[in-house]
Amino acid sequence: MDVILSNNSQDPIYLQIVEQIRAQIVQGILAEGTLLPSIRSLAKDLRISVITTKRAYDELEREGYIQTVAAKGSYVAARSHEQLKEEYLRKIEEHMRSIKLLSDFLGLSEEELGMMYQLLVKGDA
Amino acid sequence: MEHAIACTNVRKKLGSFSLDLENFCVQKGTVHGLIGANGSGKTTTIKLLLGLMKQDEGDISVLSSSAIAQDADTRNRIGFIVDDASVPSMLNPKEMGAVLSHVYSEWDATAYSKLLTQFKLDQKKPYRSCSRGMKVKVLLAIALSHKASLLILDEPTSGLDPLSRDEILSLLSDYSKDEEHTIFITSHITSDLEKLCDYITVLDDGKVRLTEEKDALLDSYRLVRTTHSGLSDFDPEAIIAKREGEFQIELLMHKEQIPTFAEPIRITLEELVIMLAKGGYRT
Amino acid sequence: MKALLLKDWYLLRKRWGILFGIVLLFSVLAGAQATMLYTLMSTMMLLMISLNTLAYDQHDGWDAYVCALPVSRAQLVLSKYLLAFLCIMISVVLVLISTLVLGDRSAESLIGNASVQISFGFIFVACNFPLILKFGFEKSRVYYLVVAGVLIGLTSLVSQSELASPTFPALPFLVPLFALLVVLGSLRLSIFLVKNKEFSET
């Protein structure tokens, strides 16, 4: 598991951790059932407080990405196919928003955007 | 037992200086740092906690003991470093170990020896012949060699070179991985505390100015730089403190109160403490 | 307690070779001479050795350090008094041997010596220890030297005067007993003083 904290990010530290771990889970880098480092060893390694790592893990558990077993630690939770699909859909929607922003800026119409997408699909085929 | 240390309405007067710990506590299983300038009352606080001084008013509880000066059993579980208190200067680490093995019920001679080796300390060299850095390392080796559940450390990294400081912080970090272990550490080297601590308390002129979880503290404030002419664009109420230079002004603000045109910069603990002091500890 | 005496032993074996040599010298002289002077000096020198461990304790900051260790303050004081008693006994034995070898072997003389040494030693400790424990070695230095001088002088005079003669056979036993009571009282006082001591100096 990799976590690198950024000094440039304006996000609170616990959030950076949540996002990085979540991304690794979604991308499959952290497989189901993987045991995560304890909140204490993670805190010490990153030189942040255990309260912060606990908060991050609590958030991930709330979102359903990990499960904590008492006295054993936290594991990457089993994900149903539905849940994964939902995650990917969310990501696509995020990307679409970014595209819309950019195309609005340029003043592209929906048709022009559609054409660009068609070209892309044809190019990959 | 939730609190490893709890001070309620504690007051101690020493000449013209007065220490006032209204409601101060250290949670079990955390690393709690006390930042303060020289003379702010850090050492006095530590001495009160170890029973080397007695408070004028108020209650102090250390590992659930309310009379630490009379409670040898509790002192058995505390490892400490405090200014003005030291081991006999003519003894060497080996002899010290022999003496202390009869003092602490859980003395771990193997751990002690290992630490001395790790610190590259000569076991036969008298304490007084050691450099300041080596002396602190001996005291730390002692503090870590009797299965203490609480470490009370007064400026353990002061006067040490960066490499030694890193070594010591690393050891303390390892010690704190155990959730049964608590560390209370004072320092005026804020960068050390920033790396190690879960909670930070700022002590100024005998008074506690703030106690916060470290990351939340650093997450909630930002630094903003502006020009002398640009200063008027900011809401004066939102400026917690400012530092005026010749070519630029640095402002301390809450993250949410920063206007969109300004670039927020993450702040280090040291900068935060300095700015808060400049701003009169307005939060 | 064992730990504290062990610590003093480590301290002593490093430094006090010369002093101990002087003690031996005085003890030998004590045996050879008729006056009490060297006898008392031998006890005095040994007590100085034990006092010096106290001085080092305070100078090093050990007196504060030890109070944060799981050692009771009463034990701390007791160990100092115990060390002093040991020193007195050693000086008694040394003078005894020296007198047996070199000097007047009469029972009176031997008992008289021991009695004077013990009494002197106890009173010396009783007067000085509470002061040194309360105010520190440095500040008490002049005081205890004066006390030492006075006591030695007094003891010397008294032991040579009429009171030491066989007209009062119980005296050599009563005086040390009285001195013992005094030093026990001093011990209680010292424990009280140390229990309430605050280490606020920087």
Image (cartoon, helix red, strand yellow):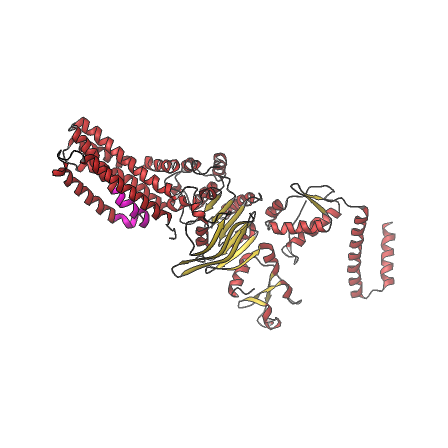
In the picture, the quarter occupied by the N terminus of chain C is: top left
Residue B101 counted in the magenta span: no
Is A113 left or right of A21, judged from the image as shown? right
Q: Name the magenta segment's main secondary structure.
A: helix
Which residue does the image show at 85% across and 54% down from the upper left?
A120
Residue C33 found in image quarter? top left
- Residue B205 image offset from top left, x and y in percent: 46, 61
Expressed as whole percent of the image width and height from the top left, the position of residue A115 reads 87, 59
Position of residue B82 in the picture relative to residue A60 (left or right): left
Q: Residue at x 43, y 51 (%)?
A: B47
Q: Which residue occupies the foreground of this view, A114 or C1?
A: C1
Tell me where residue C91 appears, x and y as whole percent: 24, 34
Above or below residue A24? Residue A9 is: below
Whether C176 is drawn above or below A13: the answer is: above
Determine whether B28 is above or below B100 in the image.
below
* Residue span colored magenta: C124-141
The answer, for residue B250, to whether it is visible in the render is yes
Frontmost residue, C136 versus B155: C136
- Find out whether residue C137 is within the magenta segment: yes
Q: Nearer the viewer, residue C190 or B20?
A: C190
